[in-house]
Image (cartoon, rainbow, N blue to C red):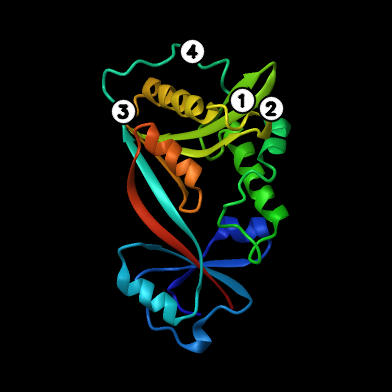
Amino acid sequence: MSNYFSQREWDSQFFERKIFSLELPVPKIKSNDWPIDSLITIKASSTDYLSLNTINEYCFSFIEGELVFKKDIKANSKAFTSFEAYIANHGAIEELKCIVSDLYINSRFREPWFSAQERDSFYQKWVENAVLSKFDDCCLVIKNDGAISGFVTVKIREEEATVGLIGVALPYQGQGLGKKLLALAESYCIAKKARVIKVATQTSNISAANLYSKNGFAIADISYWFYKQV
């Protein structure tokens, strides 16, 4: 197998199959170099025309586009003084998992490459890990009559913050809760001395893209995901 392939260890273990990334720029690959019985993934920049052309020649399937939005935080911005009421604890995990089910239908983890159950399990594990601070730093929630109506996960490294997942429970969608969740995440980032917030979404998720654009975020990067089953 060519050294250009690197196994996605966490993905392979979680989905119980061999999943690899093909490094860019895409090299000349011989037929016997491909790892058999494997899913090969590529994420390429929208401006990397040479790689995009080679990806097409190798008969990869286009899966989804990714938009990365960025917002600079003003130095004099004010934050909440306490987030204790908003940070989800272990007891919220099962409720959050129920909200996540069927929430991310635009995900790149889609059929026929991944089942709907595998997709939901992936995001349920993600939100669980955020609550437990195993990947994202925390999961912030907004409640209505004691029930979680929306959530957002945040990770901060030095002065750069990343919104991992943001979701609104089905009964509360269309009520402006996404804007409130972004404001909550931004306030948390200000309190933690972050200066930049980034968030990614799929190009097919127009409502999310509009939400970020209307709340001061600008597109910083565009890329595409491709899969090939070997």
Q: CA distance from mark 2 to mark 4?
A: 19 Å
- Numbered mark located on residue 92 in the image: 2
Circles 1 and 3 in contact, beta carbons < 8 Å:
no
- Numbered mark located on residue 21 in the image: none
- Seen from the viewer's position, the closer of residues 186 and 21 is 186
Which amino acid, by three-letter code, is at mark 1?
Ala
The mark that comes first in sequence, 2 or 4, is 4
From the image, tell me which residue sits under label 4. Answer: 82
For the residue labelled by badge 4, is the local secondary structure a helix, a strand or a loop?
loop
Which amino acid, by three-letter code, is at mark 3?
Ile
Which amino acid, by three-letter code, is at mark 4?
Ser
Circles 2 and 4 in contact, beta carbons < 8 Å:
no
**Residue 153: % across, % down:** 53, 34
For the residue labelled by badge 1, is the local secondary structure a helix, a strand or a loop?
loop
**Residue at screen point 34% across, 29% down:** 194
Give the quadrant of residue 152: top right
For the residue labelled by badge 2, is the local secondary structure a helix, a strand or a loop?
helix
